[in-house]
Image: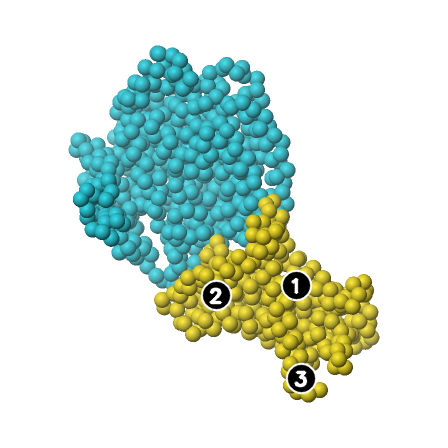
Chain colours: A cyan, B yellow
Amino acid sequence: MPWMNRATADRVKFEFKDVDVEFTKHTTNLHVKQEKLIDLLTHLKEKEGYRHFIDHTCIDFPDKRERFQGIYILYNPDTNERVIVKTWAKDGKLPSLEKLWHCARWAEREAYDMFGVEYEGHENLRRMFMWEGYPYHPLRKDFPLEGFPEVELPSLTELYAGRTEPPSHDYEVMHTRVATLEDLEKTEKSRLQKKAQLMLNWGPLHPGTHGTIWFLFDLDGERVVQSDVILGQLHRGMEKIAENIYYFQFLPYTDRMDYISAICNELSYVTAVEKLLGVEVPEKARYIRTMFAELQRINSHLLWLGTGALDLGALTVFLYAFREREKIMDIIEGNAGFRLTSAFLRIGGVHYDLAEGTLDVVKAFIKDFPNRLKEYHDLLTRNRIWLRRTKEIGVISREDVFNYGLTGPVARGSGVPYDIRKLEPYAAYDEVEFDIPVGEVGDVYDRYLVRMEEMVQSLRIIEQCVAKLEKLPKSAPYVNKEHPAVMAPKEDVFMDLEDMVKNFRIVVHGESAPPGEVYASGENPRGELGFYIYSKGGSKPYRLRIRSGALYNLSIFPKLIQDGTIADAIALLGSLDPVVGETDR
Amino acid sequence: MELWLSILITLIKILVVLGVFLGIGAYLTWFERKLAGHIQARIGPKLVGPFGLLQPLADGIKLLTKESVIPQNADKPVYYLAVVMAVAPALLLFSVIPFGPGFKLFGYEIKPIISDVNIALLLVFAFGSLAVYGTIFSGWASNSKYAFIGSLRKSAVVISYEVVLGFSVLGVILLAGTMSTTGIVQAQIERGVWFIVYQPVAFILYLFCMLAESGRVPFDIQEAEAELVTGYNVEYGGMRFGVFPLAEWYLNVMALSAIAVVLFFGGWSGPPIFGPLSPYLWFLIKMFALVFFVLWLHWTLPRFQARDITEIGWKIMLPISIVNVVATAIVAYIM
């Protein structure tokens, strides 16, 4: 995806004299003073058409005078251009954008939680992931990776037998803080003031939420008067971890974000890192990646279909979907060695060459799958009850797509053809043919149809990938091992001294990246998964921001469910399809 | 006939019906799980006994040996009463079902029905309405929001469908000229035609009401495990929990199917191809065909939401049923 062009930048520069325009290798940055930020962003949104909010985060520079730099990534759907706006937080304060883009509210809460940056004019500046009363801001550079051990957490043995010498277990005695029940109660109370009859909790563990999200509903009968979401039960500090390990080491962590579409996550991540490192990927690897990413997409959509239908009471679709899912799992397992968190891709290629017979199995799957899809359609698509449960429920308008930073099938269900695979092709997506299905109304039913059609399109892509891979010779390279930052495949490492030394060096010292910044994203089953990497050189990113599609898609939930019933909530949540591993990271 | 003898005969009938239908109810769980398995491309229970036939037994033992956990703030008497109120009306429904024609044994006339009263159908409605107390009590007494919402949903459904149920059956009563269940079957046998031929609309309405009353898909909103965990029985454990599905999903479905057979399918009538047991077998076959249909729906359809169910009940089905009654009355008067 191109970045803001010079003509637009000049226009902006003409309008705002003190805006510095910086054209870096991978991005276009606008530097603006904090006082002018709102004006500039309003101008960009209303005059220049940068109305799709992609992401907001901060970077901590402890040795700079202002310390925190706010980063805003915006997208112009008319010209297909992105821009990054940067500003320094004066006295640790930034203006809130919630009047401009509603989803900025959540991004700001996250930045407040992680950096302690105050947002002026924010209606409810609460912590996003950590609990109320947590004293630290974890993504600050002075917060150590392992945290501050300050609470004593005895093991079960110690509880019964007291402290023994030698100790009964080899953990440290002191631990970092854990949320207590009082903390959680305080968190819950601070989110929602009861207005109606009944406060209903969904979660943190509830069969309808597909993970550890915590929903609060204020109910008047069955009608939802207001609702809020408490996230963070699965918060593992991925971004903090990424800052402390080498680029290649972070790859398996990405699997554990949206654990249902692991390979898509990896693909987004390696795309960003390869851009930063300047790595060319061999043709075969690109096609393998595309094929597996699409298989993973079908896999993920099948899980969505099964659980979504299960939530609405259609028990059989769930098992039908899992039957096909199992076949894809087997294909992935046969190649990567793992079923769920596969860690199959590598920077510069893929981990293994295609396993023998893979293409035959995939071909059999392609042949069989359309019949299965027909089964799902037969069961649901024209079913009266299904229509009644999904039509006209949770209608998202096109403006809201931009205002809430919605991406993926949720955006496409509302008729916005936003698909990174077309707009900024990565892997081999520019060499295969496929269509982007879009909805018209933007209700739950449209999102259902969009996802169903996406599976058909994925099948088309896979078919083309198989045809291409069959033509490629078996000896074609699947890793670009010539590049100094790319590890050679294992069989070469065992046979070749040079490769062994190189691998040894990378494993010990990491890849050395040039200073610079890059934002690259991939089209995940749950929306745009973006990686913003700010590198100061060296083998670890200075800041790695993960733009989660699921989080932004979820941010519209409280608005949509207002005045709906809790039965609608379950249909709606299924259609937004968040995965907590990715929303919390 | 002496009093004590008639009491004894009634007791024996009660024991036979209880034994047979509680046993069938338990085995219906096995049948449903097998059926669901085959519908869903899996096998279903197969490890406990041959073809998994001992599975209901294993389930029962498991449920009986569970620790009984009662929520702290539960209203204990009502909490226990709810279990009774759930299962008693479902069992009482069987008391007015005629399983076959009367016969003579040792010189005594015996009717295979526990109480052949002339207001049998009224009793059916009364018991159906009573069943809602089990749900309400369980939801209220367990002091849980999920259970509470589930029970409220269920009562909304039952109230709206009781009315439709009553109207849909009125047509049959008009045709038969009696409210006694044996009388209705006799009327069909005498005319040589099943009432479903005269009352197809009423039968479809009855089918809907039957699903709604027994809380089967697509009307299982009081359960709605995705939203309400399992709804009104979420705070019950062990066999106390087991009683609710047994009463609602199995006994109620069987009883209502049996009544449907009586009303619309000529009860025990059928060609005598099974010898002397023929009427009873015909009755069971017809009943299980309906039960099978209900189970089949359960594993195929999604569920409605509460709003839609009451809307369909009041706005669509009630007018249709009233029109049906009026039309039947006029036709019956003219003929």
Residue B112 vertical placement versus A59 (above, below): below
Residue A362 vertical placement versus A162 (above, below): above
Do the numbered discs 2 and 1 sit on residues whose CB atoms are within 8 Å? Answer: no
Mark 2 or 1, which is nearer the eye?
Answer: 2
Crowding at dot 3, Cα within 10 Å, few <14 / some 14-19 / many 20+, comes out as: few
Q: Nearer the viewer, residue A174 or A416?
A: A174
Q: Is residue A420 left or right of residue A513?
A: right
Q: Residue at x 40, y 59 (%)?
A: A200
Q: Residue at x 46, y 68 (%)?
A: B138
Q: CA distance from mark 1 to mark 3?
A: 39 Å
Which comes before the other along the chain, label 2 or label 3? Answer: 3
Whether residue B320 appears in this view of the structure is no
Q: Is residue B192 left or right of residue A276?
A: right
Which residue is tagged 3?
A: B5
Work out which quarter of the rendered image holds the N terminus of chain A and state it. top left
Q: Residue at x 77, y 74 (%)?
A: B186
Residue type indicated by callout 3: Leu
Residue A315 vertical placement versus A79 (above, below): below
Residue type indicated by callout 2: Arg
Q: Is residue B123 left or right of residue A190?
A: right
Q: CA distance from mark 2 to mark 1?
A: 28 Å
Which residue is tagged 2?
A: B240
Dot 3: element: helix
Marks 2 and 3: same chain? yes
